[in-house]
Amino acid sequence: GAGVSQTPSNKVTEKGKYVELRCDPISGHTALYWYRQSLGQGPEFLIYFQGTGAADDSGLPNDRFFAVRPEGSVSTLKIQRTERGDSAVYLCASSFLAGQETQYFGPGTRLLVL
Amino acid sequence: AQSVTQLDSQVPVFEEAPVELRCNYSSSVSVYLFWYVQYPNQGLQLLLKYLSGSTLVKGINGFEAEFNKSQTSFHLRKPSVHISDTAEYFCAVISQGGSEKLVFGKGTKLTVNP
């Protein structure tokens, strides 16, 4: 079946602009995660949804970052007033349940802030 | 809080040689352990995971890992590597019964040379 998809695959924006990154999880997966991977680093957790609600948003770096999952499926990560330091690959993952369940990752969105 | 240390950032080996990628973790609670692989321009893919039971875990593509609780390690091994194993490998943990987020190491770049 289809895996996790993310759009766009690449996004170039200017400092100060607003961006939205979309994640389409595997059908039927209730848990959805966002991670950020900077160059030379492992992925770092941003936020986790169980259904429609954000169960853990402790990884969001500041209030410029926000994510939603209004119908419990597709999720959008929103970044306001982008800064050059936001440049990274943003990864989305989903799992059938949470905890020990395998998280299946999408290919990521590469964000470059000029 | 958990942390993961991957002791080698780069590991070059020749084709058909054995390889071991080292991973140590730190946690005040019990954890589940994972190894993910990231091929160039692709998303993270699960290689194997340890949840409970036998400490020797076998995964895809001939990889295996051994959980050592006393040494808090989860090293990944393959007896004979192929050119196609060239990729970045990430060790990760999730706390049992706590946060659902994966905590990743910084990754080990495995390069298999002919």
Image: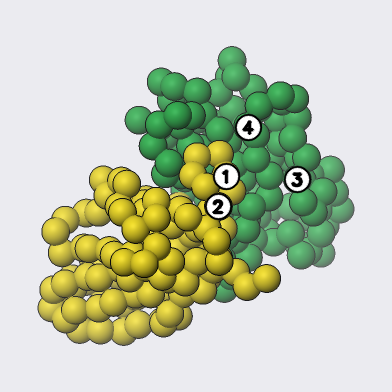
Q: Chain of mark 1?
A: A
SS at mark 2 in the image: loop
Q: Nearer the viewer, mark 2 or mark 3?
A: 2
Quadrant of res B66: top right
Residue labelled with disc 1: A101
Q: How far across and down, in percent of the image, does residue B81 sit? A: 81, 53
Question: Is the residue marked by circle 1 packed among few (<14), some (14-19), or many (20+) residues within 10 Å?
Answer: some
Whole-number angstrom distance, CA of label 4 to CA of label 1: 10 Å
Asked if residue A103 is positioned above or below residue A6 in the image, the reply reads above
Q: Chain of mark 2?
A: A
Residue labelled with disc 4: B51
Residue labelled with disc 3: B59
Q: How far across and down, in percent of the image, does residue B55 sit? A: 72, 25
Q: Which chain is yellow?
A: A
SS at mark 4 in the image: loop
Residue type at mark 2?
Phe
Quadrant of res A22: bottom left
Asked if residue B83 is positioned above or below residue B29 in the image, the reply reads below
**What label sits on residue A96 in the rendered view?**
2
Asked if residue B31 is positioned above or below residue B76 in the image, the reply reads above
The extreme front residue here reads A71
Whole-number angstrom distance, CA of label 1 to CA of label 3: 15 Å
Q: Quadrant of the N terminus of chain A?
A: bottom right
Residue type at mark 1?
Glu
Q: Chain of mark 4?
A: B
Q: Quadrant of the C terminus of chain A?
A: bottom left
Q: Are marks 2 and 4 on the same chain?
A: no
For image coordinates 28% across by 77% down, the residue present is: A20
- Whether tag 3 and tag 4 are in contact, CB under 8 A, the answer is no
Judge from the rendering whether residue A52 lies leftward or rightward of residue A6; answer left or right.
Answer: left
Res. A102 visible in picture: yes
